Image (cartoon, rainbow, N blue to C red):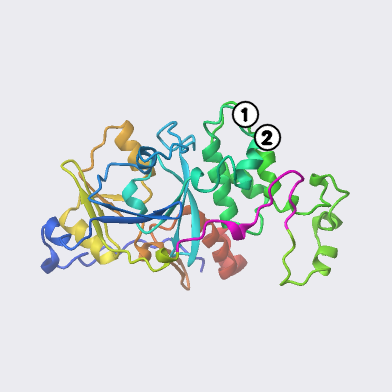
Amino acid sequence: MAPIAISPDPTPAPAVSPSATHSLSSVTTTYDDTLRFYLNGTRVTIDNIDPEITLLEYLRGIGLTGTKLGCAEGGCGACTVVVSQYNPTTKKIYHASVNACLAPLVSVDGKHVITVEGIGNTKRPHPAQERIAKGNGSQCGFCTPGIVMSLYALLRNNPDAPSEHEIEEAFDGNLCRCTGYRPILDAAQTFSNKAGCGKATSNGGGGCCMEKNGGEGGGCCKNGFKDDQPIKRFTPPGFIEYNPDTELIFPPALRKHEFKPLAFGNKRKKWYRPVTMEQLLEIKSVYPSAKIIGGSTETQIEIKFKAMQYSASVFVGDIPELRQYSFKDDHLEIGGNVVLTDLEAIVQEAAKHYGPEKGQVFT
């Protein structure tokens, strides 16, 4: 039997027992009101913050104006920054490219925020910055910081060199209205695995052995090196060599960061960040109309452009139980807050796990 969608139990038990039903203030009385995160390698602590402030407003307010405000609805990518965090789904550190104009500042607790100023400057540029500039990938420059940070996130998540397709997909959320995308892509493709060999035709060579035999590989590159010997990444002449080992490390303190339930608020809005399913269900039990926030991409647009008002919001992005998945005999269980990037990988894994017959639904 192929895996199928499972309907919820028609008569579920109460989410929270009657004895646990209290006022919202009593439920959240032990919640912390201090935001702790890292910004470009520096620890930041903020008390009693306004939950309506976005990450972009905060960054530009403290002078990090390389991150731009464009469309204010997550469409142009000029505000892109990288938010590094521990991913409970993959059990690895993940570097996400995030639209700072939509991300609430209070959502970055326990995370590392990296802006374009944090990776390089005019005297010591990051290879991504240098190659975009020298490759004529910038004219007015307004969108360039966001493009650089999208490329930076891709490089951090693919230290062994991304594929050409992955590079193209990385810029899906970035718009450029004057340069055109060809020089931007050409500059970014110098980091790809196809450009990783000095003999590759893309680098002016006669052809890499991996390009021969119909691209099947198996030539000298595989025979001449042992598996434990890394092949040196090819750097085009005139460019700074990219070395993943020199990147900003994920702060060791964040590996030990204790995620505490948080509560922030003002007269107009309350913001809660539970860290367990029990805490989430307690809040929803006493305040059923509280808006559940996953990534805030749609909610911020509703607030800004549709004049929607949410007096209380509950951020569920840091509840590990909602980021898990498991393979059952006849179905796949996926947490309600698994991000789409992880979901794509999970579906591919499920197709292999269930085999060609049962796994048809995933292909």
Secondary structure, mark 1, is loop
Q: Position of residue 222 (x, y in %)?
A: 80, 66
Q: Is residue 219 magenta?
A: no
Q: How many other residues sit within 10 Å of disc 2, few (<14), some (14-19) or many (≥20)? A: some
Front-most of 8 and 315?
315
Total numbered badges shown on the rendered structure = 2
Q: Position of residue 164 (x, y in %)?
A: 68, 48
Whether the residues at callouts 2 and 1 have beta carbons within 8 Å, the answer is: yes
Residue marked by disc 1 = 179
Q: Report the amino acid beneath label 1.
A: Thr
Q: How many other residues sit within 10 Å of disc 1, few (<14), some (14-19) or many (≥20)? A: some
Q: Which residues are magenta?
A: 233-251
* Residue 1 horizontal side relative to residue 20, left or right: right
Q: Position of residue 313 (x, y in %)?
A: 25, 49
Q: CA distance from mark 2 to mark 1?
A: 8 Å
- Give the quadrant of residue 269: top left
**Residue 183's disc number:** 2
Q: Report the amino acid beneath label 2.
A: Pro
Q: Is residue 106 above or below residue 220?
A: above
Front-most of 277 and 143?
143
Q: Is residue 248 magenta?
A: yes
What's the residue at 29%, 36% (across, down)? 303
